[in-house]
Image (spheres, grey):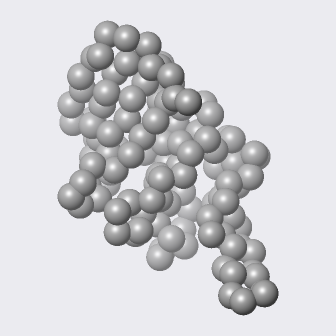
Amino acid sequence: LYFSAQEGILIFYHIKDLQYEMKICADISQPISSLIFSPDYTSLLLLTDQGNVYSYKPAHSGEAVKLLDTCSSCFVAADFLTPGNKCCVSVTISGEVQVWFLEDGTFLSSLNLDTEVHVT
């Protein structure tokens, strides 16, 4: 079970029977608003309240890597593009849908919806 604390800490709970073990995986020092696993569960996207997107690979147990930084407006949602885990899509408050390469955060393309976007 992965859990994010309000302070921006990603926590992993290993639960077996009535026992559990807690491990702090990453500290990004920003409140995390969403956790999204890739379809094959090898990567985890962390979306912050400030609109940044981080990548965390559970098998590597390393730090979370900042992929996307707030541009003209905050990211309100992000997800993996399938098949595969090479790209992600994000949407900003201003309605811009963007596609990014996950390895290094390279911007690939965008589409403006010409409407404000809200996540409920």
Residue in view at x 52 percent, y 29 percent: 119
Residue 6 seen in the current view = yes
Examine the image and state in which quarter residue 78 appears.
top left
Residue 115 position in % (x across, y down): 37, 11
Residue 60 position in % (x across, y down): 48, 74
Image quarter hosting the N terminus:
bottom right
Residue in view at x 32 percent, y 39 percent: 89
Residue 112 position in % (x across, y down): 28, 17
Residue in view at x 23 percent, y 60 percent: 84
Farthest residue, direction top = 114
Please state which of residues 120 and 107 is positioned toward the viewer in this rendering.
120
Please state which of residues 84 and 104 is positioned toward the viewer in this rendering.
84
Examine the image and state in which quarter residue 67 appears.
top left
On screen, 33 above or below 38?
above
Image quarter hosting the C terminus:
top right
On screen, 72 above or below 100?
above
Residue 12 position in % (x across, y down): 66, 69
Residue 104 seen in the current view = no
On screen, 72 above or below 79?
above
Q: How many marks?
A: 0
On screen, 46 above or below 97?
below
Examine the image and state in which quarter residue 39 appears.
bottom left
Q: In this view, does 57 lie to the left or right of 25?
A: left
Residue in view at x 62 percent, y 34 percent: 49
